[in-house]
Image (cartoon, rainbow, N blue to C red):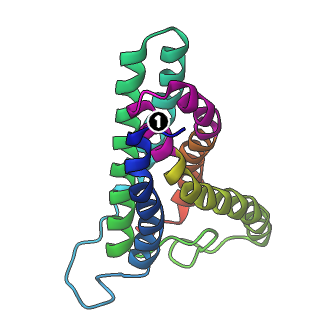
């Protein structure tokens, strides 16, 4: 039977899990510069939010090691920090896309003309990039309710249920964090300078 804390947060978890992806999708399509606002492009953000993704991955691994070694308070603090990093990433990601021209993988129009063999290599690696990007995006939507449910179960001190869902949440969240870095590394040559 669910704890009162879990029941109390179920509607909020559902709402947040729907609102965040919809808001990000809507804001992703809004570019303030294209709307005529004189805002500086925040082109410095992608390496910062990629680094935050990397830090999140390290925090997640360290948190799992902490709990396996019986360090519950350390685990709790690391997980709260990982959640804060994910929120910071999301805010920076949206801010970047609202103020800057999005990079397109393989777009060399703004850089240099590639030789024919280089174009072929870009085409091949583009398929890999798109697979990583699409799985990253899909799982980043799925991870929102999983993280929230996992967190609320810990908050409710339902550690049996927390541990059960954490075994699902951890690898997905870790994949999202790591692929966030990979996506950045792959797309970074195509950022408009």
Q: Is residue 158 magenta?
A: yes
Q: Residue at x 33, y 42 (%)?
A: 84
Can residue 10 be seen at all in this image of the molecule? Answer: yes
Residue 135 quadrant: bottom right
- Is the magenta region chiefly helix, strand or loop? helix
Which part of the image, by quadrant, shows the N terminus? top right
Q: Residue furthest bottom?
A: 36
Could you say where residue 6 lies in the image, as x and y percent from the top left?
43, 43
Q: Residue furthest top?
A: 69
As drawn, 164 above or below 36:
above
Which residue appears at 29% of the width and 90% of the height?
Answer: 35
Q: Is 138 part of what is drawn in magenta?
A: no
Q: Residue at x 42, y 76 (%)?
A: 101
The C terminus - image quarter: bottom left
> Which residue lies under the disc numbered 1?
153
Could you tell me residue 51's position as x and y percent?
42, 42
Where is residue 2 drawn, in percent x and y?
50, 40
Relative placement, left or right, of 183 versus 5 is: right
Is 159 left, or right, of 89 in this rendering? right
Residue occupying image coordinates x 33% and y 88%: 34
- Read off the magenta span: 147-171
Q: Secondary structure at mark 1?
A: helix
């Amino acid at each position: 039977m669910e704890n009162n804390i879990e029941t109390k947060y179920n509607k909020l978890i559902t709402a947040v899990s729907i609102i965040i992806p919809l808001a990000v999708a809507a804001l992703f399509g809004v570019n303030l510069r294209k709307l005529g606002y004189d805002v500086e492009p925040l082109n410095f953000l992608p390496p910062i939010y990629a680094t935050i993704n990397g830090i999140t991955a390290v925090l997640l691994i360290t948190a799992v090691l902490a709990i396996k070694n019986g360090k519950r308070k350390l685990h709790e603090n690391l997980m709260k920090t990982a959640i804060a990093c994910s929120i910071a990433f999301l805010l920076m990601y949206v801010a970047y896309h609202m103020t800057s021209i999005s990079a397109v993988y393989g777009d060399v129009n703004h850089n240099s003309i590639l030789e024919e063999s280089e174009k072929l290599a870009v085409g091949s690696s583009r398929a890999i990039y798109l697979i990583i990007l699409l799985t990253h995006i899909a799982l980043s939507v799925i991870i929102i309710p999983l993280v929230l449910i996992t967190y609320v179960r810990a908050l409710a001190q339902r550690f049996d249920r927390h541990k059960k869902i954490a075994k699902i949440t951890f690898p997905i969240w870790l994949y999202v964090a790591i692929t966030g870095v990979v996506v950045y590394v792959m797309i970074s040559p195509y950022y408009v300078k």
